[in-house]
Structures are given as structure tokens and as C-alpha cells.
């Protein structure tokens, strides 16, 4: 009986020893996608979040609940988002980004 218990206890201790505190918890992060017709926006869009610099972005095709394309990680909360296409502002609005959700910015 002891011969069966000792290997069982050792396997549990070894298995639990690989857990690192603080690395497996749920972090506050969320994803932001820019939804539109990729053929209409064949060139890349320029995206500005809050007071940061513009960066090149991609437009996702809206295919039901699962948009295809690139998504961007942003912290949850209120953000002012500006989107330009060919140097023309096509979207400029404050958006509330929800935690642990895919948040879509629908482009005209």
C-alpha cells in the first residue's frame, strides 16, 4: 500500500512544482479590430489611439461573429481613436474598450 501512495504523492508534488505564481493569472487585456470592406480599404489605414503616434493598421473583413485579420491589444477603458485612410480622417471617436472582449471599430 505504501509503495502505491509514495509515487502518487511524488507525482502530485512534481506536477504542482511547475506552477509559477503570477504568470498564469488572467491579465487585463483586450483586442481591438477595425472592421470594414478590405477591398474598399486596399491600402493600410493609419490608427491613432489617445495621444500616441499614428501607426499602420489593417482592416478586417466582417464575417459574422469572427472577424478575419489583424487585431490589436489595448488596455481596457476609454480611448480616443482616430483612423485615417489616404490622409483623410474616416473615424474619430471616443470608444469604451471592454475587458477580455473583442471590440470592433466599424469603419464607414
Image (cartoon, helix red, strand yellow):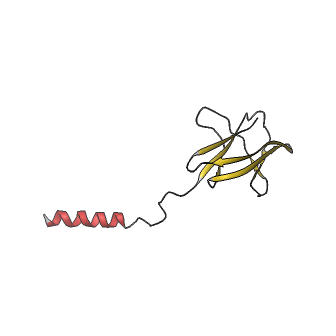
Residue at 63% x, 44% y: name it: 103
23 sits left or right of 43 in the view: left
Q: Is residue 71 visible?
A: no
- Is 33 rendered above or below residue 75? above
- Is 29 rendered above or below residue 104? below
Q: Can residue 73 be seen in this view?
A: yes
Residue at 67% x, 52% y: name it: 78
- Is 57 rendered above or below residue 62? below
8 sits left or right of 93 in the view: left
Residue at 79% x, 53% y: name it: 54
- 76 and 107: which one is in front? 76
Q: In which quarter of the image is the N terminus?
A: bottom left
**Residue 30 position within the rendered picture, expressed as x and y whole percent measured from the top left:** 59, 51
**Residue 33 position within the rendered picture, expressed as x and y whole percent measured from the top left:** 66, 44
**Residue 84 position within the rendered picture, expressed as x and y whole percent measured from the top left:** 81, 45
Q: Which residue lies furthest to the right in this view?
A: 87
Q: Quadrant of residue 40?
A: top right
Q: In which quarter of the image is residue 85?
A: top right
- 61 and 74: which one is in front? 74
Q: Quadrant of the C terminus?
A: top right
**Residue 42 position within the rendered picture, expressed as x and y whole percent measured from the top left:** 78, 37
Amino acid at each position: 500500500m505504501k509503495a502505491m501512495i509514495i509515487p502518487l504523492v511524488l507525482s502530485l508534488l512534481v506536477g504542482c512544482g511547475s506552477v509559477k505564481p503570477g504568470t498564469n493569472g488572467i491579465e487585463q487585456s483586450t483586442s481591438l479590430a477595425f472592421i470594414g470592406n478590405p477591398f474598399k480599404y486596399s491600402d493600410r489605414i493609419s490608427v491613432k489611439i489617445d495621444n500616441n503616434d499614428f501607426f499602420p493598421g489593417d482592416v478586417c473583413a466582417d464575417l459574422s461573429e469572427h472577424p478575419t485579420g489583424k487585431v490589436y491589444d489595448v488596455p481596457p477603458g476609454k480611448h480616443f481613436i482616430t483612423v485615417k485612410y489616404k490622409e483623410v480622417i474616416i473615424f474619430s471617436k471616443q470608444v469604451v474598450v471592454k475587458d477580455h472582449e473583442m471590440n470592433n471599430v466599424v469603419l464607414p
